[in-house]
Image (tube, rainbow, N blue to C red):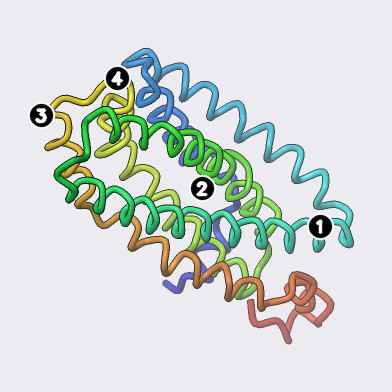
Amino acid sequence: MSTTSILARLNAFHIVVPVTTVVFALSFKAGGLGPIGLVVGAVAGLGWSLLLGFVTQRLNRQASLRYKLEDLLVFLAIVGTAFLYVGGVMYGLLFSAALNEPSTSPQVLSALMQPTIPYYIIVNTSMEALVVPALLYVGWRAGKRRTIIVAAALLYYGMRIWTYLVWAEARVDLAAGPLSARDIDRFKELMDNDRDILLVPMFALFIIAALVPAWNQDRPAALPTSARTD
């Protein structure tokens, strides 16, 4: 069964609702709420994904607005992915240099961590709560662009779930107070991860999606049924 036929049997709600529910649940737990955060986050994610779907479906009724909104969301996804990748590269370079400098104290490392926390919270929250799910809702129409968007979105969600399960809670704990020698060793271990590798194909896919005009996806609808290829 081809990817196109699989997507034809689904709609955006089948992907956005369960994934957003899981991501929110893990996010609330990693944010310090513990096990109760899983329940609170799941409820919040479920409610938000359904509300966002309802709003975007209403906007989808206006073709000209839908095309502009879809292109805007693709652009924002490109910008967000670029911010994450460039930020990750700079983060790695900065902390690698700091950790390799014998004179760097735990207090300095702790101070360096603080500005990175709101940066990643703002970018990732914008992407996972608004840009990516809204793009799936708005861009869910038969065509090559939908396949590209879904592939990029699944890569992003995979990276976020990986982050929350393996990395996020430990990172929050380290940033919560002064670092000990043990914390520094733990931080070095956390820096050795391959999550950012997923950002490269994700960025490429969003770029490719931007090269496929949104309005072009509705052209097959104007053809006779026998002439359609979707």
Q: Between tags 2 and 1, which lies in front?
A: 1
Mark 4 lies on residue: 177
Which residue is outermost to the front?
A: 103
User: Mark 2 highlights which residue?
Assistant: 15
Type of amino acid at the residue the image marks with label 4? Gly
Dots 4, 1 in contact, CB < 8 A: no
* SS under mark 3: helix
Who comes first in sequence, dot 2 or dot 1? 2
Q: CA distance from mark 4 to mark 1?
A: 46 Å
Mark 2 and mark 1: span between their CA atoms?
A: 20 Å
In depth, the one of 168 and 74 nearer the eye is 168
Give the residue drawn at x 64%, y 73%. 143
How packed is label 4: few (under 14 Cα within 10 Å), some, or many (20 or more)? few
Position of 180 relative to 129 (above/below): above
Q: CA distance from mark 4 to mark 2?
A: 37 Å
**Nearer the viewer's eye, disc 4 or disc 1?**
4
Amino acid residing under circle 3: Arg
Q: Where residue 104 is drawn, which disc sits there?
A: none
Left or right, 96 with respect to 155, comes to left
Chain-order first, disc 4 or disc 3: 4
Q: Nearer the viewer, residue 140 or 23?
A: 23
Classify residue 172 by image quadrant: top left
Kind of residue at disc 2? Ile
158 on left or right of 82: left
Question: What residue did someone put label 3 on?
Answer: 182
Query: Residue 92, percent across and down?
Result: 31, 53
- C-alpha separation, residue under disc 2 versus residue under disc 3: 40 Å
Q: Is residue 15 left or right of residue 162?
A: right
In the rendered image, the vertical position of residue 7 relative to residue 40, given as above or below: below
**Which percent across, then down, holds residue 60?**
80, 52
